Image (cartoon, rainbow, N blue to C red):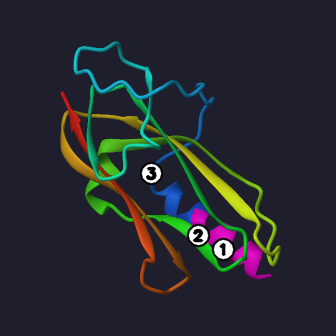
């Protein structure tokens, strides 16, 4: 039951970002500002850094967590909601109560407009303070 609640809560939080579409393959991070739209920028290794994008770029993020049925990654940057559209999301390896097990959460978020904003995901138990965060400053030109 807890697994269903956690997965449902994650889906509700991410649904605010928009609808789903076909998932493009991830490519290594490229933070140059003169790029073609619809490129995929892997920001998974850019915690606490700045990434330069253009509208149309897709930000790919892959985060891991303990598959204990208690923890999840939550979208935590309300200022970014109108600047991004959720293109796709994937949750895999989620097996509650498996000692030492890991789950993987992946997001594909398309940049919709120019501007500077913070993108943040917090890792926590439901209704508890975040134990860690993934934060990237996005500069869209």
Q: Which residue does the numbered mark 2 point to in the structure image?
A: 72
Q: Position of residue 48 (x, y in %)?
A: 29, 53
Q: Which residue does the numbered mark 1 point to in the structure image?
A: 6
Q: Specify the quadrant of the image occupied by residue 51.
A: top left
Q: Alpha carbon of mark 2 to alpha carbon of mark 1: how far?
A: 7 Å
Neighbourhood count class around disc 2 (C-alpha, 10 Å): few under 14, some 14–19, many 20 upward: many
Whether pointer 2 and pointer 1 mark residues with C-beta atoms closer than 8 Å, the reply is yes
Rendered residue at 42%/39% (across/down)? 43
Q: Quadrant of the C terminus?
A: top left
Provide the major secondary structure of the magenta segment.
helix
Note whether 128 is above or below 29 in the view shown.
below
Q: Specify the quadrant of the image occupied by residue 130.
A: bottom left
Note whether 124 is above or below 94 in the view shown.
below
Q: Alpha carbon of mark 2 to alpha carbon of mark 3: how far?
A: 17 Å
Note whether 95 is above or below 108 in the view shown.
below
Rendered residue at 76%/66% (across/down)? 101
**Camera-side mark, 1 or 3:** 1
Q: Magenta region: which residues?
A: 1-10
């Amino acid at each position: 039951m807890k697994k269903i609640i956690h997965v449902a809560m994650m889906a509700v939080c991410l649904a605010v970002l928009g609808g789903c579409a076909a998932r493009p393959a991830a490519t290594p991070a490229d933070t140059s500002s003169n790029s073609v739209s619809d490129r995929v920028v892997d920001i998974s290794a850019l915690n606490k850094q700045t990434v330069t994008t253009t509208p149309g770029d897709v930000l790919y993020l892959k985060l891991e967590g303990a598959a204990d049925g208690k923890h999840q990654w939550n979208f935590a940057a309300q200022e970014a909601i109108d600047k991004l559209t959720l293109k796709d999301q994937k949750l895999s390896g989620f097996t509650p109560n498996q000692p030492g097990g890991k789950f993987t959460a992946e997001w594909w978020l398309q940049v919709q407009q120019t501007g500077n904003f913070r993108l943040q995901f917090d890792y926590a138990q439901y209704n508890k303070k975040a134990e860690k965060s993934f934060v990237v400053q996005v500069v869209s030109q």
